[in-house]
Image: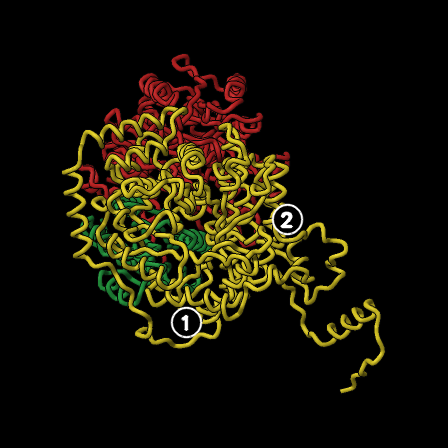
Chain colours: A red, B green, C yellow
Amino acid sequence: MSQPKLPQHHWAVPAALLAGDRRVLARSISLIEHGELAAGLVSKALAPHLGRAHVLGITGAPGAGKSTLVHAMLGELLARGQRIAVVAVDPSSPISGGAVLGDRVRMGEHGAHPNVFIRSLATRGHLGGLSQSTEEIVDVMDAAGFDTIIIETVGAGQSEVEIMRVADTRLVACAPGMGDNVQAIKAGILEIADLLVVTKSDLPGANATARDLKDMLHLRSAQAAATWTVPVLQSCATTAAGVVELLDSIAQHAKVAGHGRRLAARRPPKAAVALDSTALVMHLASVDPFAQSLGIRCTEAGKGTATVSLTLQEQHLNFNGTCHGGLVFALADSAFGLASNSYGKVAAGIDAHVTYQQAARLGDCLQARATEVSRSRKLAVYRVDVTRADGAVISSFTGTVYITGMDIAAAAAHAAQETM
Amino acid sequence: MSQVVIPKVLVTKIGFDGHDRGSRVVAAGLRDAGMEVIYTPPWQEIATVVKLALEEDVDVIGISSLATDHLIVPKLMLALREAGLNDVAVIVGGIVPDTDEATLLEAGVARVFHPGSSMADIAAYVHELAVVGRTQRVAV
Amino acid sequence: MNEAIRTEVLSEAEAYGAWQQDYATSIGVDKTVVNRSGVPIQPIYTSRDWNSKDHSADLGMPGQAPYTRGIYATMHRGKTWSQRQLTGLGTPSEFNARLLEVLAQGATALSPIPCNSVFRGYDMDESHIELLGTCGTVINTTAHMDRALQGVDLAKISCAQNDPTPFTLLAFMLAAARRRGTDWKSISGTSNQSDYLSHYVANHMFFRIALPGARRILTDHIEFCNRFLPKWNPMSVVGQHTQQAGATPAESMAFTLCTAIQNAEDCMARGMDPDQFLPRFTFFFDVSISFFEEIAKFRAARRIWAGLARNRLGAKDPRSWRFKFHAQTSGVDLTRQQPLNNISRVTVQAMAGILGGLQSLHTDAYDEALSCPSEFGARIAIATQNVLREEAHLTDVIDPLGGSFYVETLTDQMQAQIESVMQRVQDAGGMYKAVECGLVQGMIGESARKFQQKVDSGEQTVVGVNAYQIEEDSSARPVNTRPDRASMQRLIDEFKAFKAERSQSAVQTALDALARSAGDVKDNVFGRVVEAAEAGCTHGEICQTLRREMGFGHVQAIV
């Protein structure tokens, strides 16, 4: 039996990909899907070629009519002369690990149009890694010259929030219902939605559902910037009602706030110290490949503090079925690293100590909160508590950093140069 | 990410016949065997099947044929080659007379599964085709 | 052996108790047995399970509600079932030659099968030539239909058409009849498989137009036939497709009855009176090799339908309460391995249908699982029916299994199964809605998978496939005939010439009127199809026009 291949650390951008060769595009996507390339390699290599495409994320509970909506949108976008690529994400069976990828067929005959490219992706249970793969697949499609890229996901779990972050414009679809449909929309998704659409608007209850959604918008904690108010639209894919208005609204969002947003999040800020700590830390968290690959999210940050969280999946467990100690350490260390770097200067860890008080299990949501114990010109000490949702303390961590004189932006550029 | 091969399989029907009980059962069976299956309804155009196989980079195409639609499978094989998809394996399942089976194998079909074939055999063979196909892949 | 010979007369209870003991000690491992519909099957049935004293009201006499024993007083003893064999191959002339042979061999009714290209709504010049005429006859115009039915007096011989929405082939037949001077009022037959819902969920063979359009055209078709074709059955509600796709016999019957209700209610919403159209509703079923289950299924169906027609649909004419059906032996039970065994299988299936009280029967050829049936195989299929009727004398007694403890009990149990599935469909809002939301498709797929698991595990034996296999000499299998490529090419050339030479303005006018009718609820779409057939429009042109106006039917891909 052959050993599984290790991911490659080198990938040259194929000229044919940039020229629009579909087969090369498909094969490049496979390299990412099959895990043959190191995480982040593709995005880095393609950086100079990105930015043409507007990336639209569509999510919603199963049965919300997403694929039918995408079908209607494809028709209209094709009529506008666009080239569209679609990433359709379907859940893998938790029992067999296999999947029936049915979205593209529900998108109808447009799948056969030469200006449409559809790729189906199964979630495979690698929920943390899925958003990384999706981001890289979207980058490959962007480099291949598509005008619009649509990501369609199921919207049944936390992974969908992550995937939606890959998009420039985020749309949440909801079918008319008795209120259950609105409740089914995870709060996390609502926080980042740019547009809400009530599908199957010919059914009774469409207006009531639209009202419910508008009410839920008021509960959002992060109010969007003044440039964009989240609209609640209605559409009926079978009659094509509302589709033109929806696309116009999406285009408006792209112009005002969306287009290229996903790329802007990757660029290190020019003057890191000019940014406030919260924004800086959130940015750093999003460009940490290791934390990203584990599914670690930063939920709060400030000067000298940071809180990260993670929901335990299968791959985080050890042979005893409890959370791997290294994972707990990584979670605490992430909070530690973010808090210590929040001042804009590169802080390097030189000592860390961890204790493990309690076991954590599959499905547990763990939170690590770092607070500053002391900070001088050259050294700082942080304490991190890792807690479970019920308040139990899983682990306690202490770490020391050496504060370098380098600005964070300069450090990123230096690191990029070294790998070329 | 480990590189366990998860076969990606297209299960489809070309031509005019619409009886799809077999293809649905096989699609479900392959999913239950841990594979990723793209299942289409019947009456797919050959060009559509080729486009789909290319975009999804499938390892194996399974064609289900009840009546006589297998007679245009050679046209599909030609279209796949013209699109540069020589390394996509094709299997045919359904009612295929012996004389026609020889023609299909000559045209490049890997194997024909007749009525009475077990799901386990089909899944094992598809898995083998996918593993072999991946190791022989030419780098892009 | 020490067995006391019982000389005294036992009471029924003692006898039963003694049998139970004997059985328990002798049986060894007593496996639970369940039929395809999930009904548990006992080793024996007695008056404890069913007796005529308590249950005669459920039984009735043949020709009387609830028709459990048969819809007519005389059944097969009075008039034998019709032998309606499907026939179809190649060009219209080749088909005509085969047709006349089949009539000479004893077939009393016709059922031409058109080519798959016709089923999909395409003309011959739009299709792969390899696939033309391989499993059915290519008929694209009125002239083709006329040629195909040469020598057949439509006023005397019943000729069904296997051609659903928009029923172009019937339109061609009517146009041909008018050219011959045959009065439409004398034409008898059935729009076979006109049930668009069954195609949508299971067979997909004939599916062409989106669901809402197909629904409208069917209702128009029923209305048209009611007015102009008094001997024609426009509605053939199909159970065969769902059962062949994997539904259990009870599920399939339930779906069929729910579809009949749906279609009837659509007609009533149009203002038609149930007693006007119900007498012309017919049903079409698969008959599997699960012998007693099928007999019980049909007996239960007659009873259920009588109640539905009378109580739910409000029909007053007893002709409306009669459950008339055609059955076809199930091709799904046949095997490719040791194909001659299929002759035995078809015989058992045919017997089940006959003893179940069908009105018309198609027996499959033994080589169904190898290719489209050969002439040789088709001949044996017809002979099977002749043997059953004339040598086994199956027509002598009406409902011969009536009163059997087993068959009566099973009839009641099948009725309960059928009604429970019907309730699920009704709860989903009726058959149309249940199909739209995929409920029916999901149930069928589930049953198909379960059956496959039983075969794969060996729990269900299939002789020659998972048991009793032998090494077979493939050269012993019949070589199937393919249509002559040269004559097909000639037909295509003739067809192209016909299109060039006909009156383009007449064709265009007819197609425009057809297109307009799709958007006008007061017009009758099928009436316009007939006019288009008479104006020289082709099958593909008619289907294409309606697809454009009403939407192409796309099947959901539910696994």
Q: Earlier in the sequence, mark 1 or mark 2?
A: 2
Q: Residue at x 54, y 35 (%)?
A: C274
The quarter of the picture where the N terminus of chain C appears is bottom right
Q: Quadrant of residue A2?
A: bottom left
Of labels 1 and 2, the one closer to you:
2
Answer whether residue C131 is visible to the viewer in this image.
yes
Q: Looking at numbered disc 1 in the image, what kind of residue is underneath it?
A: Leu
Q: Secondary structure at mark 2?
A: loop
- Label pair 1/2, CB-CB below 8 angstroms: no
In this rendering, the answer to whether C117 lies above or below A165 is below
Q: Residue at x 41, y 25 (%)?
A: C521
Classify residue C529 as left or right of residue A397.
Answer: left
In this rendering, the answer to whether A163 lies above or below B117 is above
Q: Residue at x 20, y 53 (%)?
A: C488
Q: Residue furthest top?
A: A226
Q: Secondary structure at mark 1?
A: loop
Classify residue C169 as left or right of residue A144.
Answer: right
Dot label at residue C196: none
The chain carrying label 2 is C
The chain carrying label 1 is C
Q: Residue at x 26, y 37 (%)?
A: C541
Residue A18 percent coordinates (x, y): 20, 37
Q: Residues within 10 Å of mark 1 (few under 14, many from 20)?
A: some
In this rendering, the answer to whether A149 lies above or below C108 is above
Q: Quadrant of residue C497?
A: top left
Q: Residues within 10 Å of mark 2 (few under 14, many from 20)?
A: some
Q: Looking at numbered disc 2 in the image, what kind of residue is underneath it?
A: Gln
Q: Give the residue at mark 1.
A: C340
Q: Give the residue at mark 2.
A: C64
Report, in whole angstroms, how far the alpha carbon at label 1 lies from the one at label 2: 41 Å
Residue C116 percent coordinates (x, y): 31, 50
Q: Residue furthest bottom?
A: C1
